[in-house]
Image (tube, rainbow, N blue to C red):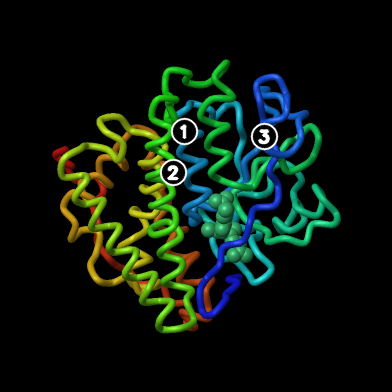
Amino acid sequence: MAATKNGEFIRWESGFRHWVTSDGSPGPSGEGGFPAEPGRYHLYVSYACPWAHRTLILRALKGLEELISVSVVHPLMPPESWVFGEYPGATPDHVHGFDKLLQLYAHSAPDFDGVVTVPVLYDKQRETIVNNESAEIIRMLNSTFDAWGNAELDLYPVELRAEIDAINALVYDNVNNGVYRAGFATTQSAYETAFDQLFATLDQLEAKLATQRYLVGDQITEADWRLFTTLVRFDPVYHGHFKCNRQRLVDYPNLWAYTRELYQVPGIAETVNMDHIKRHYYGSHKDINPTGIVPKGPALDFTEPHGR
Ligand SMILES: N[C@@H](CCC(=O)N[C@@H](CS)C(=O)NCC(=O)O)C(=O)O
């Protein structure tokens, strides 16, 4: 699961980096040959995973449900990685009927020796993985399917890109991946470093959201959705399971109201499956929660009026 160096959690590089483009020409990385077409591409996700969650959010907001089909893995992840199985909200592998996500990776690249992760954007026609890096998949979903999807919505507008990139870098290192760096640390000092950077950044974001509605001014951008998937998991999982417990999300008035506001955007609540989220983390990481017991709390109401 987690590679560590000096007790610090190191996240692996994603292995498939091709891009779906409107005409099939090559994207910023990888090879060409993946033109946007309705019904051709498939997403493999876990509802538990914050990175996969981003892709479900973009798919919903951009109105791509009919164009891009989805399979959802079982929330419990065995050591050899994600599997398909009966569980409320999980689905079979709709494309190949595989039992394990590993089989999809092997089908795509028989010599694959990287880490088997979700999300995966899969080409049903060429029977290969296009891309397994969520940051890139959401960029594709934001614009590449605009001939069919909601072209009005642009979550990565040209004039805001520099600012979005800067916020993303801060949030990725210290918050999205920061909670994992705290939770998977195997030395006290690595944990404390991650913990301090996480809460310093949350303090900074709390102050920012006191004077502006979203991370980049007055419109929702990709940066907000990337932060949201960590915030929505914060009190139910990261506060306890990953020991990120200086304070809870609900103790930050602006961040908590902002999380509720984003949750209440039409289409988003359906992408949040708290049962899968809690089952996955507490049940899969036996090294940090050996009994696998899933806490019943906390009671959180994301539908409370947000007042922003
Ligand atoms: N950089 C990847 C990271 C994806 C990732 O780390 N996914 C986790 C689930 S949250 C995973 O599949 N882990 C497999 C494992 O730990 O074996 C992305 O953003 O797409």
Spatial CA distance of label 3 from label 1 is 20 Å
* Disc 1 CB within 8 Å of nearest ligand 1 atom: no
Q: Which mark is residue 60?
A: 1
Spatial CA distance of label 3 from label 2 is 24 Å
Q: Are marks 1 and 2 in contact (CB under 8 Å)?
A: yes
Q: Secondary structure at mark 2?
A: helix
Query: Measured from the top left, where is residue 153 in percent x and y?
Result: 42, 23
Q: Residue furthest top?
A: 147
Q: Amino acid at mark 1?
A: Ala
Quadrant of residue 71 within the rendered picture: top right
| Mark 1 closeness class: few <14, some 14–19, many ≥20 residues within 10 Å | some
Quadrant of residue 211 within the rendered picture: top left
Report how many numbered discs are placed on residues in the image. Answer: 3
Q: Give the residue at x 76% y 30%.
A: 32
> In screen coordinates, is 118 left or right of 283?
right
Q: Secondary structure at mark 1?
A: helix
Q: Earlier along the polypeptide chain: callout 3 or callout 2?
A: 3
Q: Which mark is residue 271?
A: 2
Query: Measured from the top left, where is residue 194 in percent x and y?
Result: 39, 69
Q: Amino acid at mark 3?
A: Trp
If the picture is divided into quarters, which one holds ligand 1?
Answer: bottom right
| Mark 2 closeness class: few <14, some 14–19, many ≥20 residues within 10 Å | some
Residue on which the image places disc 3:
19
Q: Give the residue at x 47% y 20%.
A: 150
Q: Amino acid at mark 2?
A: Thr
Between marks 3 and 2 in the image, the one whose residue lies nearer the viewer: 3
**268 or 13: nearer the viewer:** 13
Spatial CA distance of label 1 from label 2 is 8 Å
